[in-house]
Amino acid sequence: MEDVERFLARHRPFDALPPAALASAAAAAVTEHYPRGATIFRLGARVDHLYVVARGLVELRGGDDELVEPLGPGEATGQLSVLAGLPMLWRAVAGEDTDCYLIPRAEVERLRGVPGFAAALIHRVGERIRREMADRRASAPANPFAGRARELIARPLVTCGPGETVRAAAERMRDEQVSSLVVDGEPLGLLTNRDLRDRVVAPGIGLDTPVAELMTTPVITAQADSTVAEMLLVMVDRGIHHLPVTEAGRLIGMVTDTDLLRHESGHPLFLRRRLEWADGHEDLAAYAADVRASVARLVDAETPVDDVGRLAGSAHDALVARILRAAERRLGPSPAPYAFMVLGSHARLEATLHTDQDHALALADDAGPEAEAWAAALADEVVAALERCGFPRCPGGIMASNPRWRVPLRAWEDHFRGWMEAPDEEGLADTTIFFDFRQVGGTLDAEAALRPVVGQAADHPAFLARLAHTALRRESPLDMFGQLRGMRHGRRRVLDLKLGGIAGIVDLARVFALEAGTPETNTLVRLRQAAERGVAVAPDLTEAFEYLQQLRLRHQVQQLRAGTEPDNLVPLSALTELDRRWLRDLFRLLEIAGQSVRLHLQTDLRT
């Protein structure tokens, strides 16, 4: 066979080892031969070696002997048991005559000191989770939001020139029975029936005015292969109703929100229209209930969790904005500019079917007592309205109704600087939520003032180390034997998916973003950006987050349909055997990823 050192040098993660470390690993390796059908190790075994396939095929099999994963030359197994000292979740069988290089635990422990080695070694677990999720999506019911833009184009595109008059454009829209025209010029423009109402008729603009003076530009377009979900997200995020469709750089048609409405009327985007006619608390509560039902249908269709979160978050934004407008009408104009900010999962666009209220308010620095009283009344109305819509009050009081979190903008800047410059580890658990904020109401531009302040977190390594330390000290859901232990809840043992796994990943993603100085708040975006920067554990954390969030959403949908209040507590008895296996693997992965982050941020030295 090939020389051991040359073989290892061609395969991850050994290819990144320094020459001396690579030579040491090769020298420590022992070659073992396994004839076809031989058991390499049994399910539940504790192995003392890392098994690297040199030749042949190793099959990882579950308790009922189903094939979990085949491993070929250069691939490794046994890494979680060697690194974490826990029993194997799979049985390993030689699928054909096979040779393996066995690298002793002691040598693997030495190699852990090489940055990125352990994270790369466990990357296979993340890949298995990704394949499992892909298989589930493939076997899921047809996703009603997966249609393509080109499939929704009902007629040829109707255009006009930039020099044509408003009168001529309006006549063409009437004759063609369309609600918009693409203005075919440089730059490309768009004229809609709403533009005619708001920019021509209402202000009394002359009908001989050239279209170029009134059109909207630049024009947001969609690719012909964009999915319905992607187009919906663009319309939601941009607040638009028309999307010209392009293919190979050429305009081929128009998709409107009406076209999408015909395709799927129960989507959160279309439910938002009801807010325009909502009259009173009952209508708002009905809207919130319909959004939950719509989100449940997205989960049934195995819609990616980031799309579910963005669509649910957009619907929640619209609800908060509607409540704020109603409160402003009752209270009168604000005596001073203000900013209403959502926090935590709503800010990250990761809200589920069980989410508390988390929000804050910033006032202009020159706001007086009258403005402070007005803001207090506004906050109280928002909290009460959201509670009636099914969003419980925050148990920790992190709401704009709390005077501590309703302060002038300069005080918010001081808060963030204080948290970063003199981090109190016990207090950090309560204050990290504020680093995930997003403004959804008010005319005061709080984000423009606060983002640069938060962007200075990278200058405070002790703060980042304490954040990571706080994230990593969460108790593992696994017992000393590597089994899911859960927690006692009434007569059942349950697994808290949020506290047991999701929250820790969210915390680490936040650390990665703050360390890099990026303004992103969404966990998956943060992790993907971290992966692009070379953070070795980020891809596996991404897969773990998606898996746990999907499991959490499915659990909550079942509760919603059973008429019980959704929560994060999944009974261990409700987990399938396959889910149990993946979760055991996943939580081990998180433990090892945490060890890698500890080394990177030197949490033990700085805390």
Image: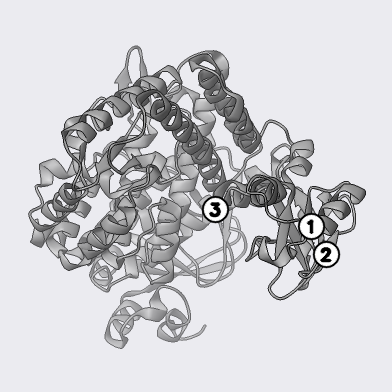
Vertical position of residue 265 compared to residue 582: above or below = above
The answer to whether 199 appears left or right of 292 in the picture is: right
What residue sits right under mark 1 in the picture?
181
Q: Are marks 2 and 1 in contact (CB under 8 Å)?
A: yes
The residue where tag 3 is placed is 130
Neighbour tally class for label 1: few under 14, some 14-19, many 20 plus, Cα within 10 Å: many
What residue is shown at x 32% (from left), y 84% (from top)?
A: 23
Nearer to the camera, 155 or 409? 409
State left or right for residue 462 relative to residue 34.
Answer: left
The amino acid at mark 1 is Leu
User: Residue 228 shows which numbered tag?
Assistant: none
- Secondary structure beneath label 1: strand
Residue drawn at point x = 55 percent, y = 27 percent: 292
Residue 41 can be seen, yes or no: no
- From the viewer's side, name the closer residue of 136 and 41: 136
140 vs 545, left or right, is: right
